[in-house]
Image (cartoon, rainbow, N blue to C red):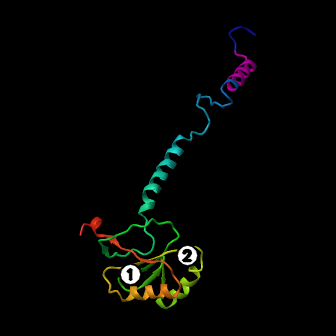
Amino acid sequence: MKPGTHNPRKAAARRRHRRHRQGGAVQASTGAVSEINVTPFVDVVLVLLIIFMVVTPMLQRGVDVLLPLSDNHKESKDTGEQIFISVDRNGQVFLGQDRVDLKRLEDQLRPMMMQQPQPPIFVKGDRKINFAPVRKVLEACHHAGAESVSLATEDRKKKGN
């Protein structure tokens, strides 16, 4: 062959040699590397992680009710093992997120009170109702064998009232 002509065998050998030198990354004819760029994916995952870290503490367990205000408010950390019983402004009783008949509440609590250690119960009564439905919930907890029952309140100082 003449010195200025194109030799396909030598060109293929040069491409193989160049690919080997670059650590096996295959290049297209434009010179772009055909490997997946994971940087945008990692960015999206980190943003989602930050969002979940910020939002998770704001999630409220049980049914949302207006809690009574308290001057001597003691904050308890939510460990995920507590049992939340809510009484809304209509007097309806909820065990977690599920509506339950007050007459059946004791029967549903009894198996939960057999766990060791016994999970604490937090009763969330709406501040707009009279105390009678909340008192009945407290009695049902007592009859089911609950050792630790607390009334959930909201700190008056944080509320600004």
Q: Nearer the viewer, residue 143 or 85?
A: 143
Could you say which quadrant of the image residue 34 lies in? Answer: top right
- How far separated are the C-alphas under marks 2 and 1? 25 Å
- Who's the residue at 53% across and 74% down the image? 119
Against 86, residue 61 (above or below) is above
Local SS, label 2: loop
Quadrant in which the C terminus appears: bottom left
Against 118, residue 5 (above or below) is above
The amino acid sitting under disc 2 is Gln
Q: Locate residue 141, reporting x and y percent.
A: 48, 84
Residue 103 in view in this figure: yes
Q: Locate residue 32, reporting x and y percent.
A: 58, 31
Label 1: how many residues lie within 10 Å, few (<14), some (14-19) or many (20+)?
many
Secondary structure character of the magenta stretch overall = helix
Provide the residue span drawn in magenta: 6-19
Give the residue at the far left of this rendering. Answer: 161
- Who's the residue at 68% across and 26% down the image? 19
Q: Locate residue 151, reporting x and y percent.
A: 40, 77
The magenta stretch spans residue 15: yes
Could you say which quadrant of the image residue 38 lies in? Answer: top right
Left or right: residue 140 versus residue 134 is: right
Name the mark on residue 118. Answer: 2
- Who's the residue at 60% across and 74% down the image? 116
Residue 100 in view in this figure: no
Against 23, residue 73 (above or below) is below
Name the mark on residue 88. Answer: 1
